[in-house]
Image (cartoon, helix red, strand yellow):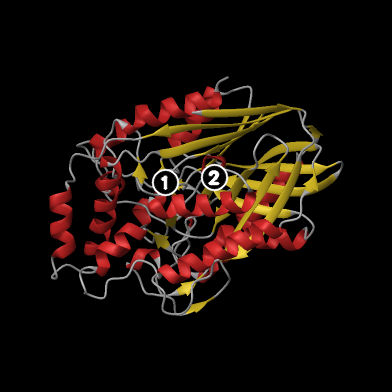
Amino acid sequence: MAAHAADKPGLRIAPFRFDVTPPVGHPLCGGWITPVVDCEDELEAIGFVLLGAGKPVVVCAVDWTGILNEAHIAWRTALAEAAGTTPDRVAVQCVHQHDALFVCLHAERLCAEQNAGLRVVDVEFFNRCLDRGRVAVKAAVPRRITHIAHGEGRVEKVAGNRRVAIGPDGKVGKMRGSGCTDAELIALPEGLIDPMLKTVAFYDGSEKIVACHYYATHPMSHYGKGHVSSDFPGLARKRRQKDEPGCAHLYFTGCSGNIAAGKYNDGTPEARAQLTQRVYDGIVTSEKSLAPTPIGSVSWKTHEIVPAVNPVFTEEDQRAMLTNAKNVPANRIRPAMRVAWIQRIAARTPIVLSALHIGDVSLLHLPAECFVEYQLRAQRLAPSRFVATAAYGDGGPWYIPVKEEYPKGGYEVSVANCADSVDDILSRGIRELLTA
């Protein structure tokens, strides 16, 4: 654990952005779906360096599906070196669109050993993205910030819980995913969600410099045919960026492991346009309540966790799936990623949770596909603070259900890399980050 604080510092913020759009032919979503055919709209990494509160702090949102294990450490290390800080003071969070990259360098090596044409990521392209990040961070121009503001707006008809079809045995049945045309599933209630899109903005006097937007849902409308896109959250963010070219707008996906748009999305291009409009409206609404106040104290806090491996997985059985040439690519690549996770935990390489506290605002950074309960829990733990949660940091764990969901089964539980004890470990870390 590390904490660094400064009282009413002379703060500066340096926004940066760089392109992370994969080339034609590159694997998408870890090699499980059609590789890149074309690009409908570019993927970006957008972030800021905060200066004046101890060593620099870097926060970055990336239009990729996920960055796992040593790949995530490589991202944080590259941005830290460029900013003149340490990797523990860098948060890298994916937005989690699926026509994008899902990167595990260890899994790529394991797959390459099979000589079967299995591909997770082009390592040269991955390294080029890190080089672009270093250049962008070093070139970022610091701006003075004197005020901070927060607001929120309700997003209508986007998010719904995926795990609402519960059978008489108490188990999750059919899943209402990102897109859905099943009338029975669509008719079910939204279920537990966080309907509020939250915004935290930084100002120099009355001039808005950076605005960070947070909303919890899987960010896919349609995907899988090779058409790279930042999808509806990215399109909404880009539209807002055009409204305010002088302000850097960032979008973070909250705890969405069990949240998606399937209740309101039939997977058509028309639905993508509707979802884009609804998220854009949520951004605009949340910004209407922004009331800048002078920045008070600033602190950065971290907490390391090493959760246990889900006991249903062993390295032996996952390697057997990886080496079985009869398996389809997805059923060889996924086990390779799981072997990488198992070996990581054996080496005791931690996941780093972090939080940036500015006055009564907390920006909380969590790993992987946390269930929405963790986000709601964080807000309850700090009722006097405005807590904005970004998930999809280090993607090694894949889904992170809360412990009471494990007995219910369902897709998310079936691919959760952590044992159910992760709930207590992660919740303890969140509590540590949000309490003095």
Comparing 40 with 53, the one in front is: 53
Measured as percent of width and height from the top left, residue 153 is found at 66, 42
- Asked whether 2 or 60 is in front, the reply is 2
- Residue at 44%, 76% in the rendered image: 36
Residues at badges 1 and 2 in contact (C-beta under 8 Å)? no
Name the spot of residue 288 as percent of width and height, x first.
Answer: 76, 43
In this view, 288 is above or below 403: below
**Crowd band around label 2 with a 10 angstrom C-alpha radius: few (<14), some (14–19), many (20+):** many
Left or right, residue 13 beside residue 108: right
As rendered, which of 345 and 281 lies closer to the eye? Answer: 345
Q: Is residue 231 visible?
A: no
Q: Position of residue 314 (x, y in %)?
A: 16, 46
Q: Estimate the x, y position of residue 95 in percent, counting from the top left.
A: 51, 54
- Left or right, 270 with respect to 306, comes to right
- Whether residue 114 is visible to the viewer of this picture, yes or no, is yes
Above or below 436: residue 252: below
Q: Secondary structure at mark 2?
A: strand
Q: Nearer the viewer, residue 12 or 286?
A: 12
Q: Give the labeled residue for mark 2.
A: 91
Q: Earlier in the sequence, mark 1 or mark 2?
A: 2
Query: Label 2 amino acid?
Result: Ala
**At label 1, which amino acid type do we have?**
Ala
Residue linked to disc 1: 368
Query: Image point 46% across, 54% down: which residue?
Result: 74
